Image: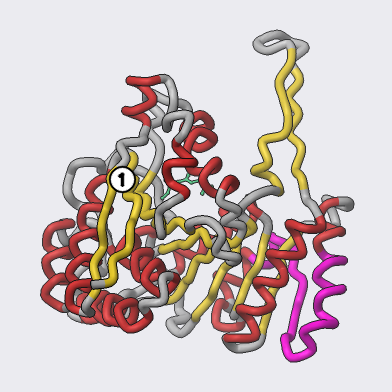
Amino acid sequence: MKSYRIALIPGDGIGRDMTAAAWSVLQKAAKAHGFAFEATEFPWSCAFYKETGAMMPADGIETLRSFDAILLGAVGWPAEVPDSVSLHGLLLPIRKSFVQYANIRPHRLLAGVEGPLKATAFDILCIRENTEGEYSGAGGRIHQGTADEVAVETSIFTRKGVERILRFAFEQARSRRGKLASVTKSNAQKYSMAFWDDVTRQLSAEYPDVEVTSYHIDAMAARMVMAPETLDVVVASNLFGDILTDLGAAIQGGLGFAASANINPERNAPSMFEPVHGSAPDIAHLGIANPIATVWSGAMMLDHLGEKDTANAVMTAIETVTASGIGTVPGKDRTDTITAALLAAL
Ligand code: GGG
């Protein structure tokens, strides 16, 4: 029987319950479709940091390299470990080391879910550059804690990095409704973001079948609220993509529905699948978080592994559950109830 080796990193807070729930759904789906998942769980998290002084062991990246994919829950426990430490110690090294440069985040309303907008029919695929830009980690602080303190943080945009993410986005647009929105703030950031706009223009000549429009981030934020149905594929830098996809999560009914895939398109290292949401310490261990975002991320993992029928079966199960009203209102149904309904729908 075909078997996939998956690295499971539950992480912190609700990440632990969400990966457990998603894993039970994915395993059932795999079994029903004649293949197996073999999980190896890694305890890398803020608790691990408290014990060892690192978010993962020094050979963590090499350990993960041999897996077919990574399923991650959430990272962060700010009461004990600064968010900048937990993020730069686990999630970002994985994304960068495995060249997972395309972070794909779908935003649409699932059957039965009422978002906060009047618009009900939208289907946006946000693509966030995932390895450089504002998240490059280039900078420093001097004279810390004094009146002369200086903090410098440099965004890095390389032609290689910008070209590959835009090319990926053009290809996605070509395979969908043929529309691409490229998001910058090139009036204010006149070097890096003007460069991004230039590369968008240059590549557009290779994709005459794709209608490409450049937007400033502020205009895009308004458009996602006022006219989300006009958008197809949206591509943005690391930070802008991060912010826009929390807005995307909001218009699709909440972070409980927002899935994501960190893709290495060249497939020379594992890709990683994780919900958009974080560890939510305020509701951790209350048993009320919605596992749908993680299960949907798992469906994206199935799709990436080439198990498209199984991915479709998981998505159908999700929408069968939400259409019945279960899991559609934040906090109404318990994690266990939603998971049981997903398993039954499969
Ligand atoms: N589900 C992964 C997670 O914990 N995300 C929280 C987060 O803050 N991620 C940082 C980022 O994606 O920029």
| Place of residue 281 in the rendered image (x, y in percent of width and height, measured from the top left) | 31, 38
Judge left or right: residue 101 versus residue 263.
right
Residue 206 magenta-drawn?
Answer: yes
Extreme top residue here? Answer: 146
Q: Residue at x 81, y 75 (%)?
A: 203
In the image shown, does 295 or 306 lie closer to the viewer? 306
The type of colouring in the image is secondary structure
| Place of residue 26 in the rendered image (x, y in percent of width and height, measured from the top left) | 25, 66
Q: Residue at x 58, y 70 (%)?
A: 224
Q: Quadrant of the N terminus?
A: bottom left
Residue on which disc 1 sits:
10
Residue 314 magenta-drawn?
Answer: no
Extreme bottom residue here? Answer: 209
Q: Is mark 1 within 8 Å of ligand 1?
A: no
Q: Secondary structure at mark 1?
A: strand
In the image shown, does 249 or 314 lie closer to the viewer? 314
Vertical order, 174 against 18 (above or below):
below
- Quarter where residue 294 is shown: bottom left
In the image shown, does 24 or 142 lie closer to the viewer? 24
Vertical order, 60 against 101 (above or below):
above
Mark 1: amino acid = Pro
Q: Residue at x 57, y 60 (%)?
A: 244
| Place of residue 278 in the rendered image (x, y in percent of width and height, measured from the top left) | 40, 46
Q: Residue at x 32, y 28 (%)?
A: 47
| Place of residue 204 in the rendered image (x, y in percent of width and height, measured from the top left) | 81, 79
Vertical order, 303 against 24 (above or below):
below
Q: Quadrant of the C terminus?
A: bottom left
Magenta part of the chain: 197-220
